Image (cartoon, grey):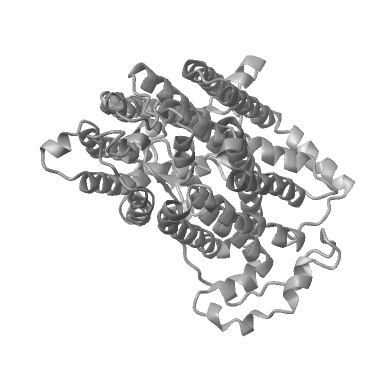
Amino acid sequence: MKRSNKGDGGHKEGVENEVYDDNSCEEDPLLEGKGAGHCMKDKPLSKWSCLHHTGIDVLAQNVGLPLLLMLFASQHLMKGFAAAFTGTCVSFLYASYRVPGPQMQIFSGVTQLPWAMKPVIGLISDALPIAGYHKAPYIVMASILGVFACATIGLVPQEHLTVTQLVGCLFFLQMQFSVCDLLTEAKYAEKMRAKPEHGPALMTYVWFGLNLGGLLATALIGPIIVTYGNKVPFILSLPLISFILVPVFQNCLEETPKSSEELAAMRKQLAEQREACFLCFLMFIGTVVLSVLGITYESTRVNAYASLIVAAVMLISFSVVLRPVIAKVNAFFLIQTSVGFSVGGASFYFYTDSPTQYPEGPHFSKEFFTSVLGVVTSIFALIGVFSYQKFASQWKYRNLLLVSNVTLCVFSVADVLVFTRLNQKLGIPDHFCVLGGSILQSVIGQWMWMPGVVILSQLCPAGMEATMYALLAGCHNLGNTIASSCGALALEWLKCQPTGAVGESAQFENLWLGATISTILPNITLLLLPWLIPDARQTDQLLDENDRDATKGSLLRWWRGDVEPADEPRPRPTTTNSTDAIDGSTTASTGSSASLA
């Protein structure tokens, strides 16, 4: 089984001699009299003795308490707790509608598409501020949609809410998570650039709280859905996802309205990156097409073919527009993610069907499937991150990707054993086999995911880090939707379409074959490593520090008549510790289809 987890670490040092200046807070907040400085000045941190031993008081003095409050609302409460708390219920909600396994995957892919829209969201917020503000108005609009969607799911009875409406509500809920995540990430990235010495401590604050929230949500969700049903977690999440409006209206983002001159300069800078803007809008069009098709067409074939077309368009466009070294890395991860066909829709029914539905099945309880597996895999995912930093952070990209992918393929044999029921013949209990396989996959999955985060960060030219990272990560996330749609078609071909009906044992006869295909195909892409992944260590610098050109040596420039050679930069060792390079990492995963939210 493959589950998503989040993990990272950091440290703090050298922060005692700098003090955050409250006078730098915004004097013109969204609500009159409620500026960031106003709301925080009268609350000295020296009185908060409970924070002394955590380092938060020192961090707040250096980066500002308003920013920490904003990150608490967006990263800890929303992305950490609420996303995990509601996300675990989604499969059970689909099952209550008797959605077939393949169709469940298509719906899941559609609802995750807002994460692939992050590049165009960032571009629009930069180019089209509202009342001079780039971030706060967009967070407010997305939050209103998200809160309304969450309330609809939680409060509207199932007989009055169609499955299509459910998918639409989940889409807008994920849109809130995506927008708030992107715009608050941009804010703390800005703070880290201004005060890089406090970056590790700030990232520790973000990711520790995010992981703690996720673990708490995972531990609670099982008993809650068993006792109160699948809709209650959405009701309980309402105050958590609404809370972000408090720091926004207190202007904890510390935004100042942009003047017309500043806006003109910013738009001029964006115009100079017209190729990147083109890719942003192209990705947006692709995600909209897939969203509409996934909601309106039940045909797995239509959705799979559309996904493949979008993948081909993205692959060709990125390869033509971007400089070769960036285009090659993007091509590798997009291809590998897209061919990692998902079988999660069918495996959900396999594990959770009752004895009357699937007599030969494992019959996992909701508590075990959600809370036990979720907590254990989350903890071991963190162990995977720490073990990566200690043992594998100095490896070359090619070697680490090769070893981690092959090892994960071997450990995935545990899934095949369970799906064929061979573990029962060998006397291995289902719970032990699944839990053991999940633990091993969680640890090794981090070793496979982390170098991807590092290399994407290394390939962002100076001056356009946010745009380029959002593009590359968004393209990677788009691959997850493609894998879900193509996996749905594969399940249909294998006649594996469970719905939770009574006596559906025949639907699982070929599930093991689907799991085998989804494990082997990503490993075939390892043959492309010598051509697409640089022969460099993770601590090597792949681009010049002052290199601001993301299209240098691209096919597009060659077609235009530029005579500059295609770049194949020689990796150069840097003095930066490799663990610092992953401080900005995003959502981890235990499989090749890791989500770089």
* Residue lying furthest right: 260
Q: Position of residue 67 (x, y in %)?
A: 66, 63
Residue located 58% across and 77% down the image: 16
Q: Is residue 305 above or below residue 229?
A: above
Q: Quadrant of the N terminus?
A: top left
Residue located 25% across and 24% down the image: 509
Number of numbered discs: 0
Taking depth in this image into account, of 592 and 424 the one nearest to the observer is 424
Residue located 69% across and 49% down the image: 143
Q: Position of residue 118 (x, y in %)?
A: 62, 39
Q: Could one spot residue 520 in this view of the protein?
A: no
| 248 with respect to 524 (left or right) | right
| 184 with respect to 381 (left or right) | right
* Residue lying furthest left: 426
Q: Is residue 320 above or below residue 579?
A: above
| 496 with respect to 283 (left or right) | left
Taking depth in this image into account, of 493 and 362 the one nearest to the observer is 362
Q: Position of residue 91 (x, y in %)?
A: 45, 39
Q: Could one spot residue 307 in this view of the protein?
A: yes
Query: Would you identify the image quadrant in which residue 110 lies?
Result: top right
Q: Position of residue 533 (x, y in %)?
A: 41, 32
Taking depth in this image into account, of 75 and 466 the one nearest to the observer is 75
